[in-house]
Image (spheres, rainbow, N blue to C red):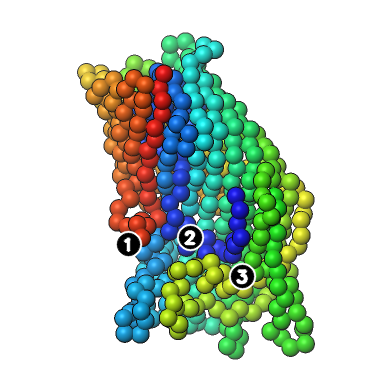
């Protein structure tokens, strides 16, 4: 993982809602018994068939989640075509009549998970079912108060109580070993042991931010700080002059650099799960990703002076014939770096972080007179501090043939309501699945989903 520019929270938010991320096994598959990756949602689940994933395409799951989207950030340019040749602009354009339509009046959140199965295999042995996996996993989340968007687009008042702003991201590779087996007629238990190799972890926040108009500039009062753990990572600073005369200059972070990259941390985690079956009922529970990563460095930055001046946010495409969304990192990165006003504090040595524990509870009922049809209810929760989320999903599951099963489902989560489906084909020697936890819906001309909630899952595996 290399990064030449990591510039600020609004830039992260803009990128997140215009990017599709890869996520782990879809929740739509939880009650689909022929789905070979069910053990990723509960380690107690086994399979009737052994499998080996086709590298890189064994399981591909694209998913983003949020309560605002691409069409809220990117708007039709009201100056086109008479005063500008660009059809699109951003919500920061002052000529847009209602720039905050579509944003939530409380917290505005967007997130993505990227859990890619590099190698995966499952087989029967040792009195149960066993799995060996190498996965690459990434999580990115941004949480913005409505007040920061109001401040960015309006600036018509003399003061704003912006509140808190949060963003974090984490990337690591895991090597895990799983085993599950039956206990008596009713119980099945399972566990996974995971070895974690950290690639990067970032946590950026601004607390109790307030803005006051002083003359023709804004005075910002806030406690901003950033922790970054990544091998070869460095902040890049430049000198800036204080707005007040005779105060001299100070070093101000305006970019970052990564020299080489590689393994920057190590940790361990476990997954625990159990399934209880009684006649036509099945109850299941799992606690997963119970662990940590110890990072070898902590590149820390903070705004040493809690009060500083800021010129404000603006849409550069308004006065120049260029599209600000062509290069958001360059267009808005400088504005964000000024808004955060961070100074490099150097390496604070090691730090330890969690990886975001997961909890699943499921219950399913199979019709006694038609056992090819069942109904299931899944409660899924991800514990990520300020970025935690939860979901409830109701599924109707159908297995008309031994080699064909799937389901349709509806869900309500922290971000939105959704409709999902899955088709799983698994004849002798081969497995193919395709489905969605959330319908993609409308897309832009660049094929970017207009909503930040979108999902697509598919995969190819060898059965034996």
Specify the label residue 337 is tagged with.
3
Specify the label residue 445 is tagged with.
1
Front one among 239 and 151: 239
User: Circle 3 sits in a helix, a strand or a loop, which is it?
Assistant: helix
| First of labels 2, 1 by sequence position | 2
Which of the two marks, 2 or 1, is nearer to us in this view? Answer: 1
In the rendered image, which quarter is residue 352 located in?
A: top right
Total numbered badges shown on the rendered structure: 3
Front one among 376 and 1: 1
User: Circle 1 sits in a helix, a strand or a loop, which is it?
Assistant: loop
Where residue 289 appears, as percent x and y from the top left, is 57, 36
Work out how far the residue at label 3 is from the one at label 1, CA to CA, in angstroms: 31 Å
Taking 112 as reference, is 69 left or right? left
Taking 81 as reference, is 3 left or right? right
| First of labels 3, 2 by sequence position | 2
Work out how far the residue at label 3 is from the one at label 2, CA to CA, in angstroms: 16 Å
Q: Residue at x 35, y 46 (%)?
A: 438
Q: Quadrant of the C terminus?
A: top left
Where residue 435 appears, as percent x and y from the top left, is 33, 39
Badges 3 and 2: C-beta atoms under 8 Å apart?
no
Where residue 82 appears, as percent x and y from the top left, is 31, 85
| Residue 162 sits above or below residue 459 on the image | below
Task: Categorize mark 3 by other alpha carbons within 10 Å: few (<14), some (14-19), many (20+).
Answer: some
Which of the two marks, 3 or 1, is nearer to us in this view? Answer: 1
| Residue 138 sits above or below residue 255 on the image | above
Q: Which residue is drawn at 35% across and 57% down?
A: 447
Taking 332 as reference, is 395 left or right? left
Specify the label residue 457 is tagged with.
none
Q: Which residue is tagged 2?
A: 15
| First of labels 3, 1 by sequence position | 3
| Residue 193 sits above or below residue 450 on the image | above
Where residue 189 appears, as percent x and y from the top left, is 51, 20
């Amino acid at each position: 993982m290399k990064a030449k520019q990591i510039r600020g929270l609004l830039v992260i938010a803009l990128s997140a809602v215009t990017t599709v991320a890869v996520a782990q096994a879809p929740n739509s598959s939880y009650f689909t018994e022929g789905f070979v990756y069910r053990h990723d949602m509960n380690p107690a689940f086994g399979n009737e068939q052994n499998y080996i994933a086709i590298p890189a395409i064994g399981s591909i799951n694209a998913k983003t989640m949020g309560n605002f989207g691409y069409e809220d950030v990117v708007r039709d340019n009201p100056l086109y075509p008479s005063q500008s040749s660009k059809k699109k602009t951003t919500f920061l354009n002052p000529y847009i009549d209602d720039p905050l339509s579509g944003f939530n009046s409380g917290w505005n959140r967007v997130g993505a998970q990227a859990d890619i199965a590099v190698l995966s295999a499952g087989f029967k042995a040792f009195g149960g079912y066993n799995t060996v996996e190498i996965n690459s996993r990434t999580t990115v989340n941004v949480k913005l108060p409505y007040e920061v968007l109001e401040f960015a687009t309006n600036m018509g008042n003399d003061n704003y109580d912006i509140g808190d702003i949060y963003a974090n991201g984490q990337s690591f590779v895991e090597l895990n070993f799983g085993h599950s087996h039956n206990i008596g007629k009713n119980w099945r238990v399972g566990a996974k042991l995971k070895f974690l190799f950290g690639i990067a972890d970032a946590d950026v926040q601004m607390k109790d931010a307030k803005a006051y108009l002083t003359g023709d500039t804004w005075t910002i009062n806030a406690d901003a700080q950033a922790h970054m753990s990544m091998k070869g990572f460095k902040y890049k600073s430049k000198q800036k002059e204080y707005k007040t005369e005779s105060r001299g200059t100070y070093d101000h972070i305006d970019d970052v650099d990564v020299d080489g990259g590689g393994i920057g941390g190590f940790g361990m985690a476990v997954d625990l799960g159990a399934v209880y079956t009684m006649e036509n009922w099945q109850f299941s529970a799992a606690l997963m990703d119970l662990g940590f990563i110890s990072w070898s460095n902590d590149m820390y930055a903070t705004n040493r002076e809690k009060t500083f001046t800021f010129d404000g946010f603006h849409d550069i495409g308004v006065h120049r014939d260029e599209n600000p969304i062509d290069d958001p990192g360059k267009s808005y990165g400088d504005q964000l770096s000024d808004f955060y006003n961070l100074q490099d504090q150097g390496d604070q040595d090691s730090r330890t972080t969690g990886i975001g524990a997961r909890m699943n509870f499921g219950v399913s009922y199979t019709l006694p007179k038609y056992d090819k049809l069942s109904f299931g209810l899944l409660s899924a929760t991800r514990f990520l501090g300020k970025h935690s989320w939860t979901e409830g999903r109701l599924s109707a599951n159908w297995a008309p043939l031994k080699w064909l099963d799937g389901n349709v489902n509806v869900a309500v989560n922290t971000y939105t309501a959704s409709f999902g489906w899955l088709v799983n084909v698994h004849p002798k020697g081969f497995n193919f699945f395709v489905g969605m936890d959330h319908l993609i819906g409308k897309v832009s001309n660049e094929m970017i989903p207009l909503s930040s909630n979108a999902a697509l899952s598919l995969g190819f595996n060898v059965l034996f």
